[in-house]
Image (cartoon, rainbow, N blue to C red):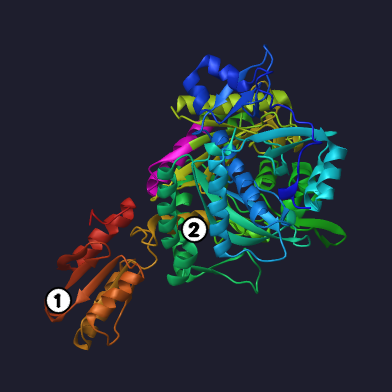
Amino acid sequence: MSLGLYTFSRISMTNIELSATRTAFDVLKEQDKEIAKRSVVARLNGELVDLNTPVKETDTVEAIMPESRDGLEVYRHSSAHLLAAAVLELFPGTRLGIGPALLDDPKGGFFYDFQRDERFTPEDLQKIEKKMKELVKQNLPYRRVTIPKSEALEKFNGMGEDLKCELISDKGSDMVSCYTLGNTFIDFCLGPHLHATGRIKAFKLLSLAGAYWLGDNERPQMQRIYGISFFSQEELDAWLKQREEAERRDHRRLGRELDLFSIQDEYGPGLIFWHPKGGMIRKEIEDFLREQLVRRGYGLVFTPQVAKRDLWRVSGHEENYADSMYAPMEMDNVDFRIRPMNCPFHIGIYKSSQRSYRDLPLRYGEFGTVYRYELAGALHGLLRVRGFTQDDAHLFCTPQNVRQEVRACIDFTRHVYETFGFTKFKVELSVRGEDTSKKYIGSDENWQLAEETLVAALAEENMPYERIEGEAAFYGPKIDFKVVDAIGRLWQLSTIQVDFNLPERFKLEYIGSDNHPHRPIMLHRALLGSVERFFGILIEHFEGKFPFWLSPLQVRVMPITDKQSEYGEKVLKQLIDAGLRVDGDFAGEKIGAKIRNAQLERVSFMLVIGEREAQTGQVAVRERGRGDIGVMSVDEFVTRAKALIKTRALNSDQF
């Protein structure tokens, strides 16, 4: 039987008799009517709950507003349930999968997975969206129901919802929560949700995709519908306009057109081939970072990409990260794993000799390539890959200098962002939170010390931040930086993490001023995150029009006719000798076609050579964005070009 035809007469409902029980909403209304009216859900004693959740006199209730991350997640999760309800009304017999909110995914703000014999079509999306709008107008309440696990399994099994039964079976509690929508829809869900569908003001269904149940390619195939929702039509319109611009800047398309990189399925998904032009940009990025590392007192290290499996058992990755690691390989009767992280290798360098407090802090930096088994459905160009290079660094500190080192990392992060043209960014402090199901290692005391260190460093750097519960690394809290690109999108880039746990696990020591051994504190630090992902973001940020110092092809020499070719060759050689990246277009095409080709290839400067330039020993300079700049000597052009490189100018206005 379809969920759409199910009735709830035998289900015991809780948390919905508002007239008989004081609710979280009642408490918020007593505190501030306007805030209560705007709130999406509430935090009851630290836990997110529906507004109609009953409360006791001793409970602490906090309003969760729409503009908060929690508020947006609940809003979009409720939108996903609205989508599922509409699908079941239009297509009875469809079976439900999962429907989470997505906050940072470019594909959309939520999705729902469905199992159905017939394929959904783009025309179906229009019908579903129309039905969703009808359900919004009906202002149907989202109601939480709690029922015994056995009864839930019986109900959902009777409706043919075997996938939901699987999820319910995996739930440890004897009681499970479900949510109803109106009188004809129920879904197994932890919640919380909005009060009613009328709160959902603006949404749009975006696309269809294939997916496997729970991401396992040996499980049933699902049909995934992506959507987006916002608190106002104006926000939705702005996002759709941004999405259109993002599609125009898509790094996968530009990567092909500009011959920067490729991904070739015959070699394996999620593995990047850097072509010469992309490789040149990567070299410039890495050269800049290495120069900065040396200036800031880092030692440049190089470490293996494979190690004995026991190393990952000690580090905790085998226990907490195995699903994302490539399978072990046996050599000489010993198991090895290819590395998903660089940190244990830098620990190995630290342990190679005895350390004194006078040696600390020790800073090791490496462009270390790692491999992680990302699910096929999650792979996305350069932004989500299986093999990538981290600009990784690990700092070994005493308790006395750890906070200063965190501050120095924050300063380093700022400098990198400024250099690459990211003028705005957001900071998040990710901590453990109250979810005990997550596998965190280390003592409560060390976690508290680590968090206090990060908070103090942020305060001293006058750095505003948002606290994110439950998003810490398994070994410690962290500061995450998200940059805002040229069209207003947020991208997760840098991270700074304080770690008391790996030094303990690996028994790291230094000899203190008291001549006794002590444990160092370890900082994990990555600024770009991964070179591949950062490069993809840069392509879209600059729309492939890289600053002169990064441009893979900085100059093209273009004689107007064959008569100027000999002088053009001399100019070409002079520019190459000056260290510029340059080529020449000596084909028989008209100069207009040569200029168009150079523009399409995003060449920074075009040096046009006509009869007058050949006679006077000059060049006519065209800049990619500004057009004609004027006529000058080759020496003058080289001097100006080198100034752009030296200053790493973001545009050529200074030329």
Question: x and y percent of residue 593 in the render?
Answer: 27, 79
| Left or right of residue 4: residue 393 | left
Q: Is residue 492 visible?
A: no
Quadrant where the C terminus sits is: bottom left
- Label whose residue precedes the other's in the sequence (2 or 1): 2
Q: Which disc is residue 376 wearing?
A: none
Residue 188 vertical position relative to residue 261 in the rendered view, above or below: above
Residue located at (53% from left, 42% from top): 137
Q: Count residues near mark 1 (Cα–Cα under 10 Å), then give few for <14, some for 14-19, many for 20+.
A: some
Q: Which disc is residue 613 wearing?
A: 1
Q: Which residue is mark 2?
A: 536
Residue 228 vertical position relative to residue 640 in the rendered view, above or below: above
Viewer-closest of 634 and 87: 87
Whether residue 408 is in magenta: the answer is yes
| Left or right of residue 231: residue 568 | left
Which amino acid type is marked by label 1?
Glu
- Label 2: state its secondary structure: helix
Q: Which residues are magenta?
A: 406-426
Which amino acid type is marked by label 2?
Gly
Question: x and y percent of residue 282 in the render?
Answer: 48, 60
The answer to whether mark 2 and mark 1 are in CB contact below 8 A is: no
